[in-house]
Image: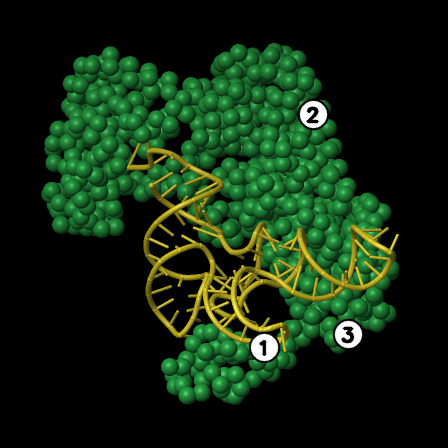
Amino acid sequence: MGYDFKGFEKKWQDRWEAEGAFHAKTGSSKPKYYAMIEFPYPSGAGLHVGHPRSYTALDIIARKKRMEGYNVLYPIGWDAFGLPTENYAIKNKIHPKIVTENNIKNFKRQLKMLGFSFDWSREINTTDPEYYKWTQWIFLQLFKHGLAYKQEMPINWCTGCKVGLSNEEVVNGVCERCGSEVVQRRKSQWMLKITEYAQRLIDDLDGLDFIEKVKTQQKNWIGRSEGAEVTFKLSTGDDVVVYTTRCDTLFGATYVVLSPEHQLIDKIKDSITNWDDVIKYREDASKKSEFERTELAKEKTGVALEGIYAVNPANGSKLPVWISDYVLVTYGTGAIMAVPAHDDRDFEFAKKFSLPIIEVVAGGKNVQEEPYTDVASGVLVNSGFLTGLTVKEAIPTMIDWLEKNGLGKRKVNFKLRDWVFSRQRYWGEPIPLVYCEKCGWVPIPEEELPLKLPEVETFEPGEDGESPLKKATDWIKTTCPHCGGPAERETDTMPQWAGSSWYFLRYMDPHNSEALASKEALEYWSPVDWYNGGMEHTTLHLLYSRFWHKFLYDIGVVPTKEPYQKRTSHGMILGENNEKMSKSRGNVVNPDDVVNEFGADAFRTYEMFIGAFDQSTPWSNQGLKGCYKFLERVWNLKKMVTDDEGFSPDLEKLMHKLIKKVGEDYDRMKFNTAIAAMMSAINDFYKKGSITKGEFVTFLTLLNPAAPHITEELYEPYGGGELLSLRKWPEYDEEKTKDDEIEIVVQINGKIRDKLMIPADLSRDDTQKAALDSEKIKAETAGKNVVKVIVVPGKIVNIVVK
RNA sequence: GCCGAUGUGGCGGAAUUGGCAGACGCCCGGGACUUAAAAUCCCGUGGGAAGAAAUUCCCGUACCGGUUCGACCCCGGUCAUCGGCACCA
């Protein structure tokens, strides 16, 4: 009738804590192992059943490594700045600090009840001034090295949160967080030059053990493209530089397009005869929200700049110049040469406005009807000195020609944009800069860090999205650290991603007041050996933190180029109805209820057994019960343990196989099959009716990383006061995992006709002989012509007959 | 549209990477125990056909085709679902 998990789960959690069993020791002579999960945002909703999937997985890794003799760091903390807390604070008129404290308290209780082997003595909190002191310090270093700059620029403005968003935070034209419409606004914003690291962020992926889809997603996001910048002369005498990856098609350019925001337009204003139309188009374009821009992408719009033309540098032909918002001001040069015969967008535009289409690459269908964009095949035509070359040959030939004649040059572009780093919000790290009329932006002295968040009456953003800190007038007024004159503090705060961009460093030395971490700790623990987290952070947190880390490497603060050696990702846990868990769908499973009813071990074991770790799977209460039953069977094993040491002859093979299987499966994150193997073993134990002490203890050790409480409890009578969690991981003997006799399959023409037990080490010839000697096979092959016999020793014999 | 992943019993999922498809668990069915039920333990469980039975045969990994002695696995094509990107020239 059940096992009394409530009687001991808490007991062991307390004992691990009291003994400091999972404390990592900086500088220990043991080899180090740094396992990390993404620290949670302590939301009011409490822990989601998805969190423990990742935490249990790396807990298993951490616990196993510890048992294998490593000095393991498996830390935990709170990524606690952010909008949901602030919005809750506004709504309920409670200080976000209090909200955060309460949420952390609840999260901490929930995490503790699950028995993770976190080193709680290293707990960190991004909203703690002792923590954000160093977030601010890093920002100051970025500023001092010219990687932080303030710029008036069109930003994504969330109409709901009243805050600027980075491109990464805009999903399908709406705010990732609140779902409100996002529009373009011009705002002065702090920016971080992540683009300066674009190439290195791609290149350095090579040496890393990241799952492939993370690497490709990051590469696609950074979006490197090789091409050329080509200069077109305008009839006004000005130059317009366009960016193209297909300079081979230059002879086919039939018009030039500038983005509506292109700077040149104002300069040549006087030569444009339809200026009113241009003004109107620009205004319309700027009013379009991000949503409209993407949704209406199909329908091309534009205005010709009348009174001017551009000259094609390849053949001197005069081309009309247009403006259109299908050309983005933020990419390349904000201007393109249009080759409608060989580009989908240009084709569409040319059709709509009846512009000429000239074929310069042969090999497609009629380019008057559809563009031919294939780069792999196709030969240049109508293209002067390029005619006859393949596209692949023509591109470098054209670039060489352009460079030789001073008409263009090779150019690499990236889709990645600089990181919009300021938020007009309260609950974030204050940006530690002051503005002085005389000296401009001046960093505050490092001794003055942390620059603490001032107290304010209300946390709402002001009209027009002013930062709530604007109301802290006393705080804002200060003196310039440079000239001593009057100055004002920056009132924007940092985005939520700031604190998480370096937290893995703080874990190494969390209480250091002199530095973000000591040199010794950084040298000892870097890099994180294994970092598991969600795919949703691939282009945000994961990229941002790699960027910060590279910067810190460049200025000599950290010893490695990359923060994380290995990155894996877990699949989502869906509701029982196979949909994403959400309050509105009513399919949320609360970890508190699960632990209360079935205990932490059953919860952990089930989350590991639920399916392939990297794939999404629906929750199942029945499946959970199955795992509970398994643990119950483990519990009841204690009644059948004999006093014998070691392994009994009839279970020896099984035990060695099991040690091998479970260990290897844990390492490869095949937790589901590791648990399955242990379930299978349990079935065998029950069949036999008794097991030795040695078998029992070994079994408990293998299960311990997944189900630490029940195994500690069962081990207690055998441990002599020692914790099972700190016991040595069992070893196996490869020889003893091998069977003496194996079953092989005999096929005739690929169909199974017989199965034979043969000695495992039987030679190829003898295996073949045994197969052909089988009665069944003899009967089947009688009177037929044996054409061929394929023998795979230890596996199969296939006899081909006619 | 582009990039990536996935598709296997009633369900979650296995399959040493080209060698017995369906491990393990759930559900369901049967039996033991019990006055009875629950719990527990044992057995069965992809579909179809033949047989009283042990057993035997056929079909089967989204669909179509190919390579191979042999394909869930490799190749070509199609469809579906999910995730990411999306006017990036």
**Is there a contact, CB below 8 Å, between mark 1 and mark 3?**
no
Q: Is residue A548 visible?
A: no
Along the viewing direction, whichever of A576 and A186 lies nearer the viewer: A576
Mark 1, Cα crowd under 10 Å, few <14 / some 14-19 / many 20+, is some
Chain for numbered disc 3: A
Query: Closer to the camera: disc 3 or disc 2?
Result: 3
Distance, label 3 to label 2, CA atoms, is 58 Å
Q: The chain shown in yellow is which?
A: B
Residue named by callout 3 = A648
Q: Is residue B77 left or right of residue A605?
A: left
Please name the residue that numbered disc 2 is placed on: A99
* Residue in the image at 40% along x and 22% along y: A289
A551 vs B64, nearest the viewer: B64
> Do pointers 2 and 1 mark residues of a single chain?
yes
Q: Which labelled disc corresponds to residue A743?
A: 1
The x, y position of residue A501, in whole percent, is 56, 37
**How many marks do you count on the picture?**
3
Label 1 sits on a secondary structure element that is strand
Q: Is residue A232 above or below residue B7?
A: above
Side (left or right) of A143 relative to A757: left
For the residues labelled 3 and 2, say whether their Cβ atoms are less than 8 Å apart: no
Location of residue A428 in the rendering, given as x and y in whole percent from the top left corner: 60, 25
Residue A788 seen from this side: yes
Above or below: residue A761 compared with residue A142: below
Three-letter residue code for mark 2: Val
Question: Label 1 marks which chain's residue?
Answer: A
